[in-house]
Structure formats: structure tokens, C-alpha cells
Amino acid sequence: MSSSLGTLFRISTWGESHGPGVGVVIDGCPPRIPLSVEDIQQELDRRRPGQSKIVTPRKEDDRAEILSGVVDGLTLGSPIGILVRNTDHRPSAYTEMQQAYRPSHADYTYDAKYGIRAVSGGGRSSARETIGRVAAGAIARRVLEKSLPSYQTLAYVKTVQHLEAKVPAELSSDLIESNIVRTCDPEAAERMIELIESVRTQGNSVGGVIECVVRGVPAGLGEPVFDRLEADLAKAMLSLPATKGFEIGSGFAGTLLTGLEHNDEFYIDPAQKASNSPVTGQPSLGIRTRTNRSGGVQGGISNGEDLVFRVAFKPTATVLREQKTVTNTGEETTLSARGRHDPCVLPRAVPMVEAMVHLVLVDHWLRQRALCS
Amino acid sequence: MSSSLGTLFRISTWGESHGPGVGVVIDGCPPRIPLSVEDIQQELDRRRPGQSKIVTPRKEDDRAEILSGVVDGLTLGSPIGILVRNTDHRPSAYTEMQQAYRPSHADYTYDAKYGIRAVSGGGRSSARETIGRVAAGAIARRVLEKSLPSYQTLAYVKTVQHLEAKVPAELSSDLIESNIVRTCDPEAAERMIELIESVRTQGNSVGGVIECVVRGVPAGLGEPVFDRLEADLAKAMLSLPATKGFEIGSGFAGTLLTGLEHNDEFYIDPAQKASNSPVTGQPSLGIRTRTNRSGGVQGGISNGEDLVFRVAFKPTATVLREQKTVTNTGEETTLSARGRHDPCVLPRAVPMVEAMVHLVLVDHWLRQRALCS
Amino acid sequence: MSSSLGTLFRISTWGESHGPGVGVVIDGCPPRIPLSVEDIQQELDRRRPGQSKIVTPRKEDDRAEILSGVVDGLTLGSPIGILVRNTDHRPSAYTEMQQAYRPSHADYTYDAKYGIRAVSGGGRSSARETIGRVAAGAIARRVLEKSLPSYQTLAYVKTVQHLEAKVPAELSSDLIESNIVRTCDPEAAERMIELIESVRTQGNSVGGVIECVVRGVPAGLGEPVFDRLEADLAKAMLSLPATKGFEIGSGFAGTLLTGLEHNDEFYIDPAQKASNSPVTGQPSLGIRTRTNRSGGVQGGISNGEDLVFRVAFKPTATVLREQKTVTNTGEETTLSARGRHDPCVLPRAVPMVEAMVHLVLVDHWLRQRALCS
Amino acid sequence: MSSSLGTLFRISTWGESHGPGVGVVIDGCPPRIPLSVEDIQQELDRRRPGQSKIVTPRKEDDRAEILSGVVDGLTLGSPIGILVRNTDHRPSAYTEMQQAYRPSHADYTYDAKYGIRAVSGGGRSSARETIGRVAAGAIARRVLEKSLPSYQTLAYVKTVQHLEAKVPAELSSDLIESNIVRTCDPEAAERMIELIESVRTQGNSVGGVIECVVRGVPAGLGEPVFDRLEADLAKAMLSLPATKGFEIGSGFAGTLLTGLEHNDEFYIDPAQKASNSPVTGQPSLGIRTRTNRSGGVQGGISNGEDLVFRVAFKPTATVLREQKTVTNTGEETTLSARGRHDPCVLPRAVPMVEAMVHLVLVDHWLRQRALCS
């Protein structure tokens, strides 16, 4: 079940890059959630090719069709099927690859695993697979927003190669969407765009780090032991193409602190005492931490602070330069990719990161309702 | 199902720190695997308290009993139950904590989630829970070794706070076990021990990074999309107590390279052509990569190179110093932990990391057998 | 996850009767299995409406489209998506039902569960949902046939109301398909057809029993304890619409025998000693039983004899006569269904029963390969 | 995962008949449920050997120990481990069986599946495995009773071979427990006891049918499509040793009715209008059916009527008479069981049936809370 995720809100994505289409089935979505195809399309538009000059110029409209599970703008509680037809096939661009394995791509490992693969467009290993995730994430978000009104997930590009954004005190979706890199620092954005255009011209690529802040998550989500919130987030992020690392809260830098420096002091915030916990229905004690080195999770369970984590994306493996490699018959050769590529995946990866957050949280939210409502 | 992990080789751990005992049930272990209680005990001894001067001096023998699933030294294919009785209860040490939440521990979040918790010894959030994992990991290792003779997992302490070990060309279990820190650099070990003893004296704590190298994994393990090998490893590692980060191959540092610098060139190693793949049974083409920035995984699937990853452990939250906190009735207070603690969890975390690797890989190995044998 | 089934060969069906379409995603199908859309269409044609004078005259072509997972007639190991567009909507026929609950249908219970439902065509509770099962079953069958050459599943109508077929010594697919009832007794078929046409004329309906014989299942499939082969078959059959009972081997009648009468004696069949077990790869001992009151399963595991079981189908709930019922606002009323209905579901249920057998067995076959190959 | 059951309330049983012990881990039990070891012991006492003259005279006290998950009489939300030590081993009684396969037992199929088995006491195929189920069922029952005050499951022996009990209008636990057969008809009980003692004297055995009535299940439990309530009940029942059939409501006899005769008319019961649905929290409309041929389930979902189903148990396979069989080396031989056996499993199967009902319902109850609370 390589293509399914979730315990209660369970998604199954399907589709090859150059087959008839890609999509997803969501099994376990609660009934009576307001949902329109526009809710989904809006997120797909943030991940689609051709949206700006720094992403791949491929032309794919990526129009979603809701096949089931929704009537008159409300979910039914039955599986929601979503289909996006593939439109931009150029199988000829892949002829050479039928033989030669692209370095740091999945061509060789698919053959090693399955003894067969869909060569054209990268088949199942193409980033088009994430269309299903982003569509499902849009639905997960609606479910969460209905129960947790202050829920908000904001991902943004923190670094592109050596260029780092300053994170302002006031983060907002508008700020992040104000530039085509999707960073929270308009000034850094310009330098990042320049860098990305420069490497594109060279047929090269760059990577970077996406940071994500999640607000409005009540204390009590996540399961101790294996299905810890940070463990499920780590898995979700490392399941995205091109990711090489995940850290939450203080992360790797936190290993340089002592325990006394690292611990998050608790205090009482009287302003929060008024509200009821959506998890327990009981009045909140107003417990907060003064710092957030924990990244919003303690013992695998959310503590009511913002979730804060970072994901490392390697430079795109597709580069338009000659590289040494081997063929599927075991001979050494060289390969030069041609055509269109993303010189930097990060701008389009921002909505993917957000979608995975929605998917992880909605599942834990439903699990918590089962356990303790 | 917070306490279960795995699709085919599925483990369920159970037990509170100061209850009758802790243990695990393994459901899905193949039959006819040679297994003795010593195989398990040996790994438990590497994680138990009191094994050296730099870990907690608690006295727990942690003797394993195999309750089922094994007859005459061979597994039956039926569930294997393992029980370790708890022996060192000191409930009195926890009286104060019934009220006050220990900073950066799971006391508050357990209450927020469940509305109840086993106060004594940290209950389920205690690191004693990992006994079940380490025991199950020892069994998973036997299964893998039977099918993959060159399989070997070597974890070691890479850094303690700012002190970093040099990784030699020749890694071995003997080298790592030659010092009580479990690092691969005997010289650094001395400085690390000094540092850990120093922070212990101060009632403080330190963290660090564990690196892990896995050899003998054939190409073809791992599933594309959600159950990628690196995603499942990330989840497994982030499910260990005190972890804050995971990176594979080039990791976060890889974001500073360009695609041309980062890609791993393929070549043919004639020496490997002789062997048959344990995944497909077909003769190997001898495909290798010259560098290993991928960390042994491409497109979520192992490529036959060593798996290489790192895990960040925060400094132990238990510090023997007065800290500000709040009570479970919502009042601010201070708390001073007393007694025994691990000033640095890393030496005892090494066998935990290895156990989680065994568990992730055995599950993917069985899944691959189902799919392609 | 109401709409997913299977551990390794996992299917997720989706779709409402009068929405855009219905379909299925199969996650976990092994690679390199020969598969064409005709393999699927052939089975769909056996379940579709309008195929004969004794089933509903609705016009639905039910043309399948393979959306993913297959290239050049071979499965890829990636998810297989299948879509069948709905074409024959007549929402007007359901206006009345928006208010009144049809007796012994799922209208009321869907509302009780979800607080919402797709009224038109019965929505998700329509037998159109089984299209996805039959399509997935056709694929499961191909997987089984590749590994188990003598595998064959033959379901047939055993009784229609009080009319019972004689089961001949020589069963075959041709015999069963030789009549529109899909019974194995051409003489009984005529009386059954007469009965079905008679109740249809009266706007009434009848039920009956389908028997199923599965050949070529090697000893060793099925898991003791919960996932027994008979338990998974029972669940699969009782998950079909209109089913009320399941029995295997001697079934309910077996409760009238004593142990001495019921036990199946073992003997050695020298003719079978030649072959190797596809489960263990070891030479067969030629162990057989002289009788088969066990129905091919002992201790939850297949013993190499034919699987033999029976499924009870109630008379169709849709009858074209006035019935007393209530509205969704809690008032008593009467309701007269109009239009087209299946006076007897059994002829179209035969391929559904077979599909569920394929799905149960392929999953256990893959699980066995994982455990013991 | 042959030994695990459930999606949210998930149990894993373990243990061989003559190993150190048997038990269960329950993962997913909600917190703050009152639970004592006596709650569990009470049910175990109903299934243990030696409780009356018509069951096996083996001496096993079957004392349960709660190893985890409960503190001060309340569940913690963490896994509950339960251990029952085995005490009555007589390995010598099984020497002969190491060679000869007992007819209609699981000896042969275990060997065919695993290539190894625990011979003594039947190992994992022993009915001792059901101890874990009965213990877990007792906990499930407590969870249900806390949320659904009128919940009650009553199983009873309906027939022993050809002897049938009359089911009175007023069923009660006291009535059923008033006789050692656990039937609801004291007069029939005497004849049944006589029959069982008679076949025991002859070294023979008998089977029969258990009927089960479940009250207080609100409308809305169960999932359409695969996890239908009747499908999950069928699987649960067919997973019990010695079962050959399951039917719900009208069952096999219902196939003799026409649709008009079979359908359950709806009506409004004003007396029920007062109450709120525990599923939706909304006021009930008072919808009832006049008959209950549906057996309390429509479209896979409970409709608020009593669940009513029947389970067929074959005559015990162990008979103390010489039978023809084969050895594990493929030679024909004869075998005479000696010693102690249950001449009729039904009296001890009654608490097993009830336990499985609790387990199925608690899982669906938690799933419903997740979906719709």
C-alpha cells in the first residue's frame, strides 16, 4: 500500500505522469463539510507548472473533477474521488531515458524494485503524484477549519541555497503569496528569484529549506509512542519528492544547548483561561510555554503552542547538462536531459508541505475525537 | 493504535514505567527463524540503566521472558510475546509531580489528551517503553540476517553538544562498543565522557547527534509515495523520545549544493555483477553510485548503497535544578527534580536507533517479498 | 475507511449511483501481470443491468477505463485506477423518496449515520458500488492465475426461493453461463426463470442461495485466529448487498452430525505426490481428505481441498407495490416504488461473489508469500 | 497480522496452549473507563475448562493479571496488557500427534503453512487462544456500557444437534446462566445435558447453534460497503474455532420469502421520540420497524432494532475413537485421541460469542464518534 496514508482520514493517490490522469480517493471524510471544486482548484493552482517564470514552463491546467462523495456542496461521508486529466504528454522527450538511468532520479530503483516502469514523464515518480495530495489536503483543511476556527498552516521558503529569508513577527498568507518564490521576506525574494533564474540559465538547479508554522492546534493531538505528531509530520514531509531532512522546534541546532537552556518553562496565560478545549470540552487552564523549543509538541502530543518545523529540499535532480550514468542493460554511458525543468522545486513545494500538514492533523483530530469525545 | 508499528511485521508495545512490567507483542514474524532469549537480552543490556557511569544509576535488570511464539529455539510464525518485569519503583520520588508539570516533559500533554495519567515514573512516556522496541528489533534483525547475510546496522554517537567524532573509514561494532559513549572515535569519546560527567555534576544535561550506517540492504526496498524508506525511517526515529530532527544522505547541508554538485553518478562495478539480487533473484548489473549524497535511497527506494542518516537528540529534559512551571490546577509554581537521571541520552539511544532500523527494514523486506517474489 | 478492503492487495471503491461515476483504486497489485481492459470489461458485462429479461432493464453500458497502473498490457506495481461513468440517471424517479424511507433499504440508516445522503439512485448504497469490486476482482484473478495455474472459482445459483438446482459432478463455467439465471442445472434454470418472471409481473421479488466452489487453492493460505480464510470469506460475502447468511463446508446442517460423522479422514493420494507446493516450494506429501465437510479450510487455513461455501441473498427490497413507511421528518406514510427493478438479484450477484473470492484469496496469497517465501 | 483485530480498539492476542501463557494487548481503549481485574475474571470464568460436568475436565484456573494501562481502577488510554499463565501442561498426551495429523484439526494445515508447529496442546490452534478475546471483550463491554447505558448482549445455545430450545419473550442473563448448557430454555437444557453426557461416554461429540441478541445499539453504527456491521460480525464469529456458518435476521430461511413478505415496515413509536440519539446527539424521530427480518442492520448500518444472529458450531473434532489419518511424513496410519475433551463446545462458546460482539461494536462505536461527533 505504497500509495495510501492515514488511519481514519485515509487517502489513496494514483496515476502516472503521462497516463490518462492522476487523482486521489479520500475515504473517511466526515459528512456535512462544505466543499466546492474551487476549494480544491485553488490549491492545485498554487502547485501547477507554468505559474511563474521560475518554475517549469510545462503547460498543465490541472483541472480537478470531483467524481463522488459530494452533493449540493456538502460532503456525504462516502469516499471522495478526484480526477485530474493529464494533458501535456511529450513521450518523445523520454526516449533516451528508456535506456539510461537519470542520476539521482528514481529510474534505476523503480526497475530494481518492480522489474518494470512507466518511462514517459517519470511515470509514478513524477511530482504530478502530489496533485492528489494537494487536492486531498484542501479537503482536510476544510474539515479542520470547521472544528478548529483558528486553525492555520503557513509554509514559506526559508532558504534557497545560501540565501536566507528574515521571518517577520507578522506572518501571513498574503505576505508569502506576494512573491513568486513564496518566501516571507520580499527583499530576500528578489535575490532568490535572481539566483534561480541564473541557475536555470546554466541548466543547473538549487535546493533550500521550507519552514512551516501551524497555528490553532489545540493541546492533546498526536499519539505517544509510534504515531507521535512529530513522527507523523516527519514521515509526511520525507514522503515528498526531493526532501532530505526534517526538524521540529530547536531541531539540530538544539543539540548545542544544555537542558536548562532548552527546556520550555510553563506559565499561565489568563487570557486563555476563558476558552474551552476543543479536545476535552473542558475549560482551558491557560497553560502556555514562554519559549517554543519543543516546536509545539511534547511527548508526541501537541501542547497548544504553534507547531514549527523545517524541511530540507535537495537541488532538483534534473539538470540540462551532460552527466555520466549507466543503461538498464548495465553499460556505462552519458545522458543530457533536454527540455523543461524546475530549477528550484521550493516555490511549488510550499502548497505540498501545507497539504501534508492538513492530512496529518485531520487524521489525528479524528482519532482524538474517537478516543475522547 | 498509538503503540503499534508496521504493516506485516507488526509490533505492539505496552507498559508503564512503574506498573507491573513492560513488553511487546510481535505479530507477523516469519516461522523457522532461530531465536533465543539471549539474542534479545544482549540488546536490552545495551539500553538498560546503570550500565556505565555516564547513564542513569537506576538499577533495573530488565530480564526478558519470551511468553509465546518460539519453540525449541525457532519461531513458529505465531505472535511473539515478550515481558520484562519492572523492579525499581520509587513512587515517592514523583509525589510532587502529581501536581507540577515537569517542563519539556509529557506530563501536561498527557493530561491534555487523556484527562488522566500514570504519574509515577512518567508512566507510558518513560523511556522504559523502548524496551519493547529494542526486544522486537533484536528479532527483526535475526529475520533480516537470515535472508540478507551481509546486512549490518551500525549506529554511533556523532556529536555530544559541540564535540564531534571523526568517522573512520573502517567502522565496526567493536569500535563503537569500545567506549561507554558508543562513539566511533575513541579520542573524542574521552572528551565526551568528561563533558557528560561535568553536566551531570551540575544537574544539567546535554544532547547530540547519532549517525547510522546500514550495510547490505539490496536495491528495491521501500515503497514510492508515502511509505518511502526515508519517510518510514524518519517516522521511526522521530518516534524515539527526545528526538528533534532527522536527515538522510546530504541532509540539510545538501541544500547548499547545486544539482550538478549533488547528483550521484552511476557506474558499473564489475565485482558486483557476479551476485544475484535477493529482491528479484536476477543477476545483478553491478550498478553503483560514485558518491552517496542520496543516502542510499532514491525515489523512496533503496539503491543498494549504504543507508546513511542522522538523528538529533535534544538535551534530557530532566535537570536537577529549580525550574518555573505550573500545576495541574492552573497555578504557577517551581519544581526541582531530584534523584537519578540520564545527563545525556545518546549512549543508551544507540541500540534504540538500531532497533528502529531493523523494524523498518524487516517490514519493507516482507512487503517486497509479497509484491515481487 | 468503510470503502477499503485488503491488507496487501488493497482496494478502495468510490462513487454514488447517480453521480459522475463509480470506480476503484487497487493499491498493492504486483508488477508485470498481463492485464487488458477487456479482462475487466468481461466481468463487468456479467454484472451489468439489462443483460437479460430477468434482470433490471436499466440501460448502463458500464464501460471501464483504466486510468493508471498499466502500461503496454502489463501492471506496473503502482495503483490501478478504474473509472466507469454513470450514464442512466433518472433523478425524477426518486423525488418521493427524498421524504419517505424505502422499507428494508438503507435510506433511513444512512440518514441516522451521516445526517445526509445522496437520495438519487440510492447514492452509495446502490449496487452500482459493486462495479469497483468486480473490476478489482478481475485483476485479482489475473494475479492468482499467474501463480496458481489450476486456480478456478465457480459460483452458481443453488436455489431461487424454493427451487433448487442439482449440482452435477462436472461443473464448468460454460454450464453456468449457459442460462440467464447462472445456475448449474439447465432444467432447474427454466423453472427459476419462470418464477422470476412471475414475481416481476406481480411487482414482487425473490431471493435464494449462491454456492461457490474454488479449485486450485494450495494448502497453507489463510491466517489462524482472526484472519481465517473462512472468516475473511464470510466478511467479504456479508459485505455484498442483500446478503443474510454464509456457511462453509457442512455449514448449519453440519450441526446435526456427531464428531465421528463429521471429521474428514486424511489419506495419501499418490498422484499428488509429484507436485511441489506453490506455498512452500517443497514436494507435496499428497495429503488429501476423503470427505470435505471442512469446506477446504481447517483451523482457518486452506487444506488443499476445494473451498465450498454458500451465501444467502434475501428477496430484493425494491417491490412495485404500496408499502407502509415513515418520512425523514418522522411521519407515517405509504410509498409505492415505480419503474425498473431486479426481481431477483442472484443472476447478477454470481460475478460479485466470484470477485470477492478473488479479492480475499489474492490478499492471503500475497501475505503468505511475505511470510514464507 | 493473523492475531490482531479492530481499527481503533485493536486487540492482539498471543500465546500457545502449552507455552508459558496466553494473553492480549488492547491498543486504543479510551481513557477513564472504570475497570477492575474482576470485570475480566468474571468472563474468563465463564469460558474456562472444568466449570461443569459437560465440559472438558482440564484444570486451568485462568487467573488474569493486568500488566499495564490501568491505574487506580481507571484505564489510562494506553495499551492494556493482560496475561494468563498456563498451568496444566501434559505434553506427554501429545507425543503421538507429533507424527499423526488429527482429522479435522489444524495440525496439517499449520505444517502446510508454516513448516513448523507447536505440537503440545495444539499450540496456537488451541481454544486457549480465545482467553485473550474474552478478556478484551470484557473491557470493550465496559466502554460500551459507559456510553450506551441500555447496551446488552445475550448469547445462548439455540440447538444442540437436533435438540432445539424455545426462546421465551423475556430473555435474561440469569435465565441463560441458570443451566450449565447456557440455553434459554431450562426444559430443553435437561435434554441437552443428557445428550452431551451420552456422546461423551461414547467418546463422540456434538455441535449446535448459538443465537445472540444485542440490545441498546443505536441506529447509525456500521459502515456501508466493506465494514458493514453484519460483515464484521460474520468475520468475528467465523474467526472462532469450530464455526461453520453465520446468519443474521431472517438468514437462510429468509430466502424462501418474497420481498413483500420480507420487508420490514417502518412506523413511528411515540415513546421513543423523547430520547436523543447517542450517535448524532439529535432528538430521535422514534423510527422503528414492525418486524425485524433485517436483524437490526440495513445497508450495513444498525437501525436501532435488536441485532439478532446465529452461529453454527460443528461437533468437536476431538473424539476418543480410532480414526484413519496420515503422518507428517506422508504415511497412512490410525490415531486414537486419549484423555480429556469437550464433547460439545457450545456452553463455553457462549461467552466467546459475546466477547466478539463487544469487540466489533466498540470498534464501530469509536469509528462513529470519530466520523460524526
Image (spheres, coloured by chain):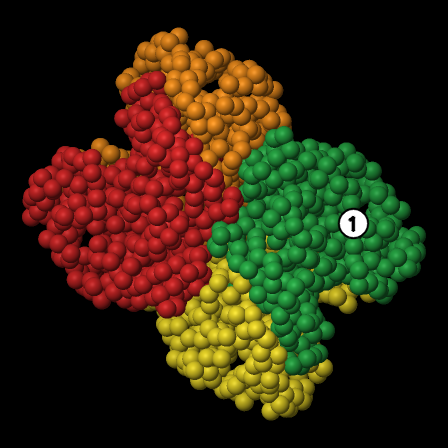
Chain colours: A orange, B red, C green, D yellow
Which corner quadrant of the image does residue D259 belong to? Answer: bottom right
Q: Secondary structure at mark 1?
A: helix
Q: Which residue is mark 1?
A: C348
Instruction: Please name the amino acid that badge 1 sits on.
Output: Arg
- Could you tell me which chain the residue with mark 1 belongs to? C
- x and y percentages locating residue B51 in the rendered image: 15, 56
Tell me what residue is drawn at x 51 percent, y 37 percent.
A114
- x and y percentages locating residue B161 in the rendered image: 16, 37
Left or right placement of residue A104 versus residue C253 in this view: left
Left or right placement of residue B292 versus residue D116 in this view: left
Whether residue A198 appears in this view of the structure is: yes
Camera-nearest residue between B314 and C131: C131
| Residue A130 in the image: above or below residue D181 | above
Tell me what residue is drawn at x 50 percent, y 75 percent.
D99
Q: Residues within 10 Å of mark 1 (few under 14, many from 20)?
A: many
| Residue B247 in the image: above or below residue C278 | above
- x and y percentages locating residue A187 in the rendered image: 32, 12
- x and y percentages locating residue D51 in the rendered image: 50, 85
| Residue D323 in the image: above or below residue A61 | below
